[in-house]
Amino acid sequence: MWSPAGDPLRARRLADERRLFTPGPRGDFAVCLAYPNRYPVAMANLGFQAVYRILAEDPRVSVDRAFLPEGPRERWPHPFRAFESERPLGDFDILALSISFESDYLHVLDVLRGAGLALRRSVRGPEGPLVVAGGPATFLNPEPLAEFVDLFLIGEAEEMLPEFLDRVANGPRGRLAILDRTGVVEGAYRPDWFVPRYAANGALAGIDYRGPHGNGGRVRRRYVRDLDAVETSSAVLAPEAVFGDKFLLEASRGCEWGCRFCAAGFMYRPVRYRSPQRLWEGAARGLELRSTVGLVGAEMAGQPGIAGLCERIVEAGGRPSPSSLKADLISPALARALGTAGSRSVTVAPEAASERLRRVINKNLTEPEILRATEWLVGHGVEALKLYLMVGLPTETDQDVEAIGALVARIRERLAAGGAPKVGRILVSINPFVPKPWTPFQWEAMDDLGSLRRKLARVRRQLSAIPAVQVETESPREAYLQTLLSRGDRRVAPILERLHAAPDAWWSILRALRGGRGDVVDPDRFVLRTWAADELLPWDFIDHAVDKRYLLAEWRKARAEIQTPPCDTHTCHACGAC
């Protein structure tokens, strides 16, 4: 979405890009793939790039991309135009939104307004583009956007997008005509076929299904069973992208460990890994283009063959850059490979600092294992560690909060006393806990904002006394908004419209609505309330193949501080995903 022809920024970005695949011939149906954020963020997203490649290779489709404009909102161009062709977004047959994070929901409304479309799907005419949305955020809970989006694709693109395109191409143009053909694709969620009912106390009482399926309105999430069968790596090299100096390569989907706060560990079940050979083939291709290979997965230290892969990348003259590593799975070989490659920073995620709270969240990780891993990493030459921790986790006590400073201090002491050639810098990232759908903590309330502020201030004071430690924290207000958008139902739509109308005043608007004041639902209902175990949840109509009873059992085990072993997909069928 760019300003008129001649924009030098757009021209430079197009000139700097390097496409790594051969697109098919341009077809009859025009699709604009929009990422509701700016170009550097969008082009760093591997899912967005994978969808772009699928669309560009399909001979029935002509695809273009769109991003949020640069600069202040009041200077954005209207109408928004596509990146490559500069065609107005409202002229496409399909406007496809790739949504990875709830924080971009407000930008979805920006895209619709910039395309010249009515925000609400119910008042759009039969012509104009069909508004389709997909991506991880919508897999979890599409309901906050259900009044704005015509159709959601609940599943992984490689599995269901070709079937969707078959139906798109098999008939006439027009928003409603395409919607009628594509709404019956398995995994498609058409909100106008689902009508929620609410009880007098505000609870979701039921959903009336008015569609043609005989499954009672269940929407089955689609997924790729064999990752080796699909290609998920950088499709376009864009120097201005975040991670623009890396070739990105997906290693796995899901996670075997089942941390009770983590949506990716449950919504991507069963966990799937690419084979070491396919990963090396992808890495070898990437090393011809970039010196650093970014290995993408929810947890990379447990990836089969990860140490050997990193060693091969180093031997080939490259640098492996895995995403977050589980401390107890870091081996000396992996630490050595990362250090030898000159990795400047490695991320380790204890999530909780006390042994007790790590049992609650099912981290399956002890403090000696954390200390050993950090010592190995820095001892082999890694210059800096990034530690992810949370405050506001369920059952958290003052002692658990105090443990954050104590853990970081012990890591610092261990590095200084271990004879390491470099005493690494430590960046501690602390975020408030946000309850997510399809996790054992989906019933939990977010901690009170005042409590979170006090905890974060206490931790910052503790960490300020430790040498060479930097601290970054997420605002409790930002966490409140994220929780609202994660756990909300369709009654969040008017709240989103108000925030869209005055984005700079978003907290003032939410604060005015809290406590039930105003003519919309109290946002605290979705954020600060612990939900009953037998309550109908807004996202219950989605079938992620994970049994809700299993999540409930894990929630109760958390309260009892009982850990669950990692997934064994060959023998265990407890959660139902296998």
Image: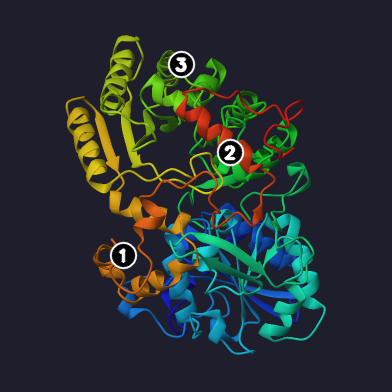
In the drawing, what numbered circle is on residue 562? none
Q: Position of residue 392 (x, y in %)?
A: 34, 38
Q: Is residue 501 above or below residue 218?
A: below
Left or right, 242 with reference to 571: left
Task: Say if mark 2 contacts mark 1, CB within 8 Å.
Answer: no
Q: Secondary structure at mark 1?
A: loop
Side of 484 relative to 197 (left or right):
left
Q: Position of residue 259 (x, y in %)?
A: 52, 33
Amino acid type indicated by mark 1: Gly
Which tag, 2 or 1, sits closer to the chain's start? 1
Callout 3: SS: helix
Q: Amino acid at mark 2?
A: Leu
Q: Quadrant of the C terminus?
A: top right
Front disc: 2 or 1: 1
Tell me if residue 231 comes above or below residue 161 in the rendering: above
Task: Give the spatial CA distance, label 1 vs label 3.
Answer: 47 Å
Q: Of helix, strand and loop, which one carries label 2?
A: helix
Q: Which residue is mark 3?
A: 369
Residue at 79 percent across and 73 percent down: it is 167
**Cα gap from disc 2 to disc 1, whole angstroms:** 30 Å
The residue carrying mark 1 is 516
Classed neighbour count for the residue bearing mark 2: other residues with Cα under 10 Å, few (<14), some (14–19), many (≥20):
many
Identify residue for label 2: 551
Q: Residue at x 34, y 31 (%)?
A: 396
* Residue 156 position by quadrant: bottom right
**Nearer-the-camera pick, 541 or 253:** 541
